[in-house]
Amino acid sequence: MEAMQPFLSRFYGNPSALHRLGRMSRDAVEQARAQVASLAGVQPKQVIFTSGGTEANNLALQGWCLANPPGQLFISPIEHSSVIKTGEALARRGAKLHWLAVDEQGRLEPDSLLEGLRRCPAGLVSCMLANNETGVIQPVAELAGLAGKEVVVHSDAVQAAGRMALDFSALGVHMMSLSAHKIYGPKGVGALIVERSLVLQPLLYGGGQEWGLRAGTENVAGIVGFGKAAELALAEQKASASRLEKLRQILEAGLEEIPGAVVIASSARRLPNTVQVVVEGMDGEMLVMALDREKIAVSSGSACSSGTTEPSHVLTAMGLPQEEARGAIRISLGKQNTFEDIECFLRGLRKILGLT
């Protein structure tokens, strides 16, 4: 907020303008670009600012398909809805959509990509770095290693940023999506990291902002907040991950003592802050509201899909029956959470379940 405030009041210039106020805004945008680039281990010129992770995912998939019509897409059924729905929309326009398989722990199976590439050795693979519901970390580097020279690899790293180290080059990807609000930045701003040799078509036409890939006057204050959040996330990542991992272990030990509670993907490598649990006989959304009355905020899956009566597409893809999938809640731990918060949650859950 401190970093953003001057650009919400005194420094209001358009960053495309040549006057002093414009140059000050442009300098702030470029500083933020460098901060976000450092978080991902890339050069600043590879960072394309967007309105968030959803736009970044759309620019990756649509932008590539527009540049390589009709497009061959390889997508797993556990991706964020902004990837799945974009892939389905592109398929309706003529792109060929190939679905990849996941195992019961929610990990994408590399063999399914190999099988798909044998049928079609060129295209775009989109695989998230870590799942936004289960927290399961996906084998992105392995998949990129399996892909041939004619295959472009995109990774939605929105959920992973700030919770695990990001290294664009080591992952072997060509595009990566980020969002500011997942690392304590403002909502409504994100970025697509792009290998500079990659050709994309823009979704928005107008001015030449973001090297012609994202027209429109920049959200300077939001971008500045994103940059500062990226700087802090990079500095705090190791210590934060270690602390959250300990809290998660305490939380899961407590859940094991609750009859009917099952932690999803418990044997998979996961983010340190994310726990998805199914409580037998409970509806997930009803449980979320009951916990809210106890002043505890959790979700029944992705916040982007809240309000739907459909079970989690992630859990059904992992093989869970629909009724079980409807009973899932996602618990996300953050930098302000403490051991006392874990105890409070477990007491609240036991109270709701009539165990106290």
Image: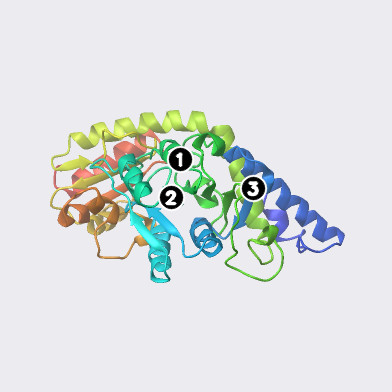
Q: Residue at x 60, y 64 (%)?
A: 202
Name which of mark 3 and mark 2 comes first in the sequence. Answer: 3
x, y percent for residue 284: 23, 55
Q: Which residue is mark 3?
A: 46
Camera-nearest label, 3 or 1: 1
Camera-nearest label, 3 or 2: 2
Could you tell whether 8 is left or right of 247 in the image? right
Q: Assess disc 3: are there few (<14), some (14-19) or many (≥20) residues with their C-alpha within 10 Å of its C-alpha.
A: many
Q: Assess disc 2: are there few (<14), some (14-19) or many (≥20) residues with their C-alpha within 10 Å of its C-alpha.
A: many
Q: Assess disc 1: are there few (<14), some (14-19) or many (≥20) residues with their C-alpha within 10 Å of its C-alpha.
A: many
Q: Which mark is residue 219?
A: none
Please identify the quarter of the rendering in which residue 94 is found.
bottom left
The residue sitting at the right extreme is: 19
300, above or below 142, in the image: below
Q: Secondary structure at mark 3?
A: helix
x, y percent for residue 89: 41, 68
259, above or below 211, in the image: above
Could you tell whether 332 is left or right of 36 in the image? left
Residue nearest the viewer, comparing 260 with 102: 102
The kind of residue tagged 2 is Val
Residue 345 makes an appearance in the image = yes
Q: Which residue is mark 2?
A: 125
Q: Which residue is mark 1?
A: 144
Residue 134 makes an appearance in the image = no
* Residues at discs 1 and 2 in contact (Cβ within 8 Å): yes
x, y percent for residue 215: 66, 66
The kind of residue tagged 3 is Gln
The kind of residue tagged 1 is Ala
> Disc 3 to disc 2, how far (Cα)?
19 Å
Q: Secondary structure at mark 1?
A: helix
